[in-house]
Amino acid sequence: MGCLVVAGCVALVVTMVGSVTGQDGRTASQEPVGLAPAPAATPEPVIQVYAARVRGLRGVFGVHTWIAVKPAAVTEYTVYEIIGWRLRWQDTALVVRHRAPDARWFGSEPEVIAEKRGAGVEELIARVDKAAHAYPWAGEYTMWPGPNSNTFTAWVLRAVPELEADLPPTAIGKDYSGAKLIGSAPSGKGFQLSLFGLLGLTGSSVEGLELNVLGLTFGLNPFDPALKLPLIGRVGPSRTFDTKVPEAKLKEAKAGRLADKPAL
């Protein structure tokens, strides 16, 4: 039985190696796949979180994640992401630029991890921008166990828990939190115990229960039924998103803005 399990894992890795290494980075498609609302035809504000398998052998194990925003009445998206190779010629890996948010990542088709649209999203966009520019590891990049692109996305998501983003188990680096051993889950909900991203435990109403061993995630989510496995990713029904910010959150944000105003 043990031999069959090992053989099955080897076959899976070989199959995935073939699928993720077949693209030449210089010629791989970076065309959008139609997951983002057309900005010119969408006056309301939009936030989307994406993930796509990385290029080369690393794609067997992990994904690259990023966050895209479009303020109200704006006709282009702004994408926030960490690109490690940028450190070869500049002092920050943080990239904030206008590009198609649903573009293939060097040939790999992206998937939407979270999305919010409409009322209340403008305030969330401001918090995304603030958190992105406060990311503490922008000047360093370590593929494993982090900090990397997924560490960045998790950092921003913790600051905007209204997005309720459940990063895939293949987002290696999402559990890296530096020397901080106890904190919130990457979604910003629940809790996380993490030892430099190498060993940890996460529990929340968004992620369910996750165990991190050497950067590999094993988990079970009873709230959005799914099994979470290394290499394979999320196994379960397709996720559905409530794209509206809850009314309670809108009232809370409004109350906060009023409290910040000076008395006359």
Image: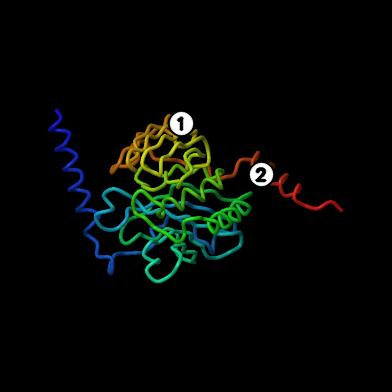
Q: Is residue 115 above or below residue 227?
A: below
Residue furthest out toward the right: 264
Residue type at tag 2: Leu
Check disc 2 and report the residue beneath it. Answer: 250
Check disc 1 and report the residue beneath it. Answer: 223
Q: Is residue 118 above or below residue 236?
A: below
Q: Counting other residues with Cα less than 10 Å from the Cα at mark 1, is it few (<14), some (14-19), or many (20 or more)? A: few
* Front position in the image: 12 or 194: 194
* Front position in the image: 138 or 16: 138
**Which residue shows up at 45% across the image and 61% down it?**
139
On the image, which quarter does residue 248 sit in?
top right
Query: Of label 2 and label 1, which has the lower sequence position?
Result: 1
Q: Position of residue 105 (x, y in %)?
A: 35, 59
Q: Is residue 114 above or below residue 37?
A: above
- Say which element carries label 2: helix
- Say which element carries label 1: loop
Is residue 159 shown left or right of residue 114?
A: right
Q: Are marks 2 and 1 in contact (CB under 8 Å)?
A: no
CA gap, disc 2 and disc 1: 24 Å
* Front position in the image: 36 or 151: 151
Q: Quadrant of the N terminus?
A: top left
